[in-house]
């Protein structure tokens, strides 16, 4: 982003498309470790990591930030929404685990194209009002994410919020962070989405949905497709095929206007 940010991008504009899920209870971390692709139990408290929820066939249902806030509280930041459906599906696997899966409509997510005030790397910082701050940027492209009470961030106009959400999505793609709309869920493996670069999955921890396929692909080196950033000659949609000189190159996983 340029140094002279548009007025609508100053401060911490809300990201209304982002949704939150909390896993709360004594078994929160163990449950998350058994369901998601990353090594949750190795994550220190007040740290976050990229993670994913996969189908039994090793295809990606959702990519998210996983925050280990306390011993009994794990939070998911879902940039692509669908938290209600994911919560309902996760609930089916709770069984006798001492964990509650909760939608967090009481909280909101906001972002800024500036360096965080206190968070650094994977370390989460507390903010005023029992909120949290995350570092999502780099020296070249600083970004910070904040989570707090729904009334803690001023709501902008629909036009301003849409413009900021698009700029945020564009920055995600520049970082190599996949954004999956509904049509692209259960289509891609973690390797194809580049989650290895984000340390978003583990091939060493115990079983989780899709783990066998992920590990086999990793150790046999059979991931034949990898995510690439590109610009098309004409507007495109996720799921469109990409060709060059009549030769098929691949399929579009995410779009974000003109980068």
Image (tube, rainbow, N blue to C red):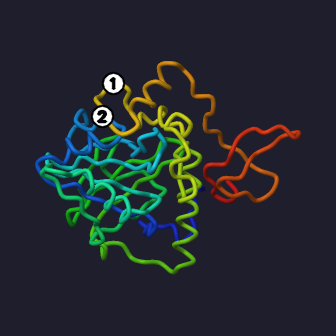
Q: Secondary structure at mark 1?
A: loop
> Measured along the vertical axis of the image, is residue 257 above or below residue 252?
below
- In this view of the protein, can residue 13 be seen by the observer? no
Quadrant of the drawing holding the N terminus: bottom right
| Label 2 or label 1, whichever comes before in sequence order | 2
- For this rendering, which residue is in front, 236 or 219? 219
Residue 87 placement, left or right of 257: left
> Measured along the vertical axis of the image, is residue 9 above or below residue 189?
below
Residue 20 placement, left or right of 15: left
> Measured along the vertical axis of the image, is residue 219 above or below residue 137?
above
Count of numbered tags: 2
Q: Which residue bears the numbered disc 2?
A: 39
- Seen from this angle, which residue lies furthest top? 220
The location of residue 80, given as percent across then percent down, is 47, 59
> Measured along the vertical axis of the image, is residue 104 above or below residue 3?
below
- For this rendering, which residue is in front, 174 or 143? 174
Q: Secondary structure at mark 2?
A: loop
Q: Crowdedness of circle 1 by 10 Å Cα count: few (<14), some, many (20+)? A: few
The residue shown at (46%, 66%) is 17
Q: Which residue bears the numbered disc 1?
A: 204
């Amino acid at each position: 982003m340029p140094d002279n940010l548009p007025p609508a991008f100053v401060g911490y504009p809300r990201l209304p498309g982002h949704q939150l899920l909390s896993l709360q209870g004594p078994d929160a971390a163990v449950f998350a470790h058994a369901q998601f692709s990353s090594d949750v139990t190795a994550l220190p408290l007040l740290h976050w990591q990229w993670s994913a929820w996969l189908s039994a066939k090793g295809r990606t249902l959702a990519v998210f930030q996983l925050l280990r806030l306390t011993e009994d509280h794990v939070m998911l930041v879902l940039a692509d929404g669908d938290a209600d459906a994911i919560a309902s599906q996760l609930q089916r696997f709770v069984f006798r685990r001492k964990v509650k899966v909760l939608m967090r409509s009481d909280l909101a997510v906001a972002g800024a194209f500036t360096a965080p005030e206190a968070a650094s790397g994977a370390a989460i910082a507390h903010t005023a009002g029992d909120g949290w701050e995350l570092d999502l940027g780099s020296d070249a492209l600083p970004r910070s994410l904040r989570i707090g009470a729904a009334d803690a961030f001023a709501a902008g106009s629909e036009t301003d919020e849409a413009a900021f959400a698009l700029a945020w999505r564009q920055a995600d793609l520049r970082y190599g962070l996949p954004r999956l709309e509904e049509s692209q869920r259960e289509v891609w493996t973690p390797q194809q989405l580049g989650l290895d670069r984000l340390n978003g999955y583990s091939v060493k921890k115990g079983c989780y949905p899709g783990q066998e396929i992920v590990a086999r692909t990793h150790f046999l080196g059979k991931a034949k497709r990898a995510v690439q950033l590109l610009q098309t000659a004409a507007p495109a949609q996720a799921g469109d095929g990409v060709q060059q000189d009549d030769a098929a190159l691949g399929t579009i996983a995410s779009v974000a206007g003109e980068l």
